[in-house]
Image (cartoon, rainbow, N blue to C red):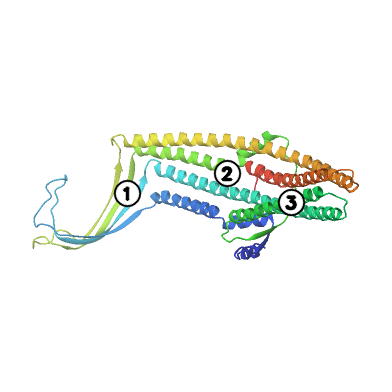
Amino acid sequence: MLCVATCLLAQPGATVKLSLADAEALALKNHPKVLAAQNEQSAMNQRIYQARSAYYPRLDGDITGSQANPRARIGAGLLNDPSLFNREGQGFVLNQLITDSGRTPNLVASSRLQAGAAEQTAQATKYDVVLRVNQVYFGTLRAQALVKVAQQTVQARQYLTDQVTQLFNNKLKSQVDVAFADVELSRARMLVLQTEDQVEEAYAEMTRALGSETPASYQLAEEPLPPSPPANVEDLVRQALKARPELASLQLSRDAAYKFERAERDLSLPNASLLGVGGYIGYIAQLQLPRVTPPEYEAVGINVQIPIFNGGLFKARREEAHYHAMEADQHLRDEAQSVTRDVRTAWAGLSIAYQRLDVTAEMLRAATQAQQLAKGRYDLGLSSIVELTDSELNLTDAQIATLSAKYDYQSQYAMMQYTIGALR
């Protein structure tokens, strides 16, 4: 089904049949925000390998050639006093970290946590896209249903206009009745135009939500009405604080910041590394004297570096990392408060939307009955055309309100599921 829908999406103006599950799957496959988040996650995973590279030896190959003044020596700028020779040589340099007092393990741990945070961010992006698909899906269903209501209204008003016109021709109704009927018919036709424009806008939004670049018309399947809202909002808040990927991402980022702070502290501790060199000097000019330098060379040593003073650089880096870690704490706290607010707001909106279902159903029942009674009274000559047109207008408003309440409740339920981290 997804393959067929994908092919249809590639054809401009095609009619695409979709269920909500199909639309969500297409969006997760095609939407650029999802793909960008996945690429960001993959990039963050590479930082783990970057940090782990310090565990492994570093081996470099060198080829060196030099030309110097015969018998010259370096006299300034360095503490050593080597002789200078024309020479050519090649060799290798090996550098293996022995210990850096825990800095590398902390950097690796920080990178892992950052990669985990990127994974949660990618998951949050998917949920954002799925939520948008749900909202646009039900908005499109609403727009399509309103077009049907508008078309039915035009048919009913056209029938009334024809009836009143025939009665006027038979001298049974006045010109005023015909004028009122014509006005209501024109108003119904305007409603059709407005709803058709809403459908086109909904199609454009659906195309964007699916991550498609080709416009299409959509034939969407109806979804069953969700269950009633949960009774206790506090349970929803606790669930959201555990399940929302945005909070998980910020928690991992906070933990990564504290690991990095520890790594910056380790800069002030000693570090040791193993050094090894070896190679071959193919040519060396020693002023036609017998060669005293052997062509092969090799050496190995251990270097221990103890930081003593660097102008406060390490301290400043440690303090900067500490403040970034505390900043991450506050971002996490702020997001938790936002999530709590969103859950309470979504729950309140869902509860109101659920109550609207009963209210609009009752309003539709009453408006239908009133329209039937007004039609009967008008046919019997007991009321004017004004009473009849008012009742038909009320019926149209009730039909629109009933449809809006249905799809708004479905959209609000999707929002509620999103805020508690349950929208998959």
The answer to which of 267 and 116 lies nearer the viewer is: 116
Left or right, residue 147 beside residue 13? right
Whether the residues at callouts 3 and 1 have beta carbons within 8 Å, the answer is no
Mark 2, residue position? 245
The answer to which of 233 and 177 lies nearer the viewer is: 177
- Please report whichever mark, 3 or 2, sits nearer to the chain's N-terminal start: 3
Q: Position of residue 290 (x, y in %)?
A: 10, 62
Residue 280 picture quarter: bottom left
- Please report whichever mark, 2 or 1, sits nearer to the chain's N-terminal start: 2
The answer to whether any part of residue 424 appears in the image is: no
Mark 3–mark 1 distance (CA, rounded to whole Å): 87 Å
Residue 287 picture quarter: bottom left
Mark 1, residue position? 274
Mark 3, residue position? 188
Amino acid residing under circle 1: Leu
Q: Residue at x 65, y 47 (%)?
A: 423
Q: Residues within 10 Å of mark 3 (few under 14, many from 20)?
A: many
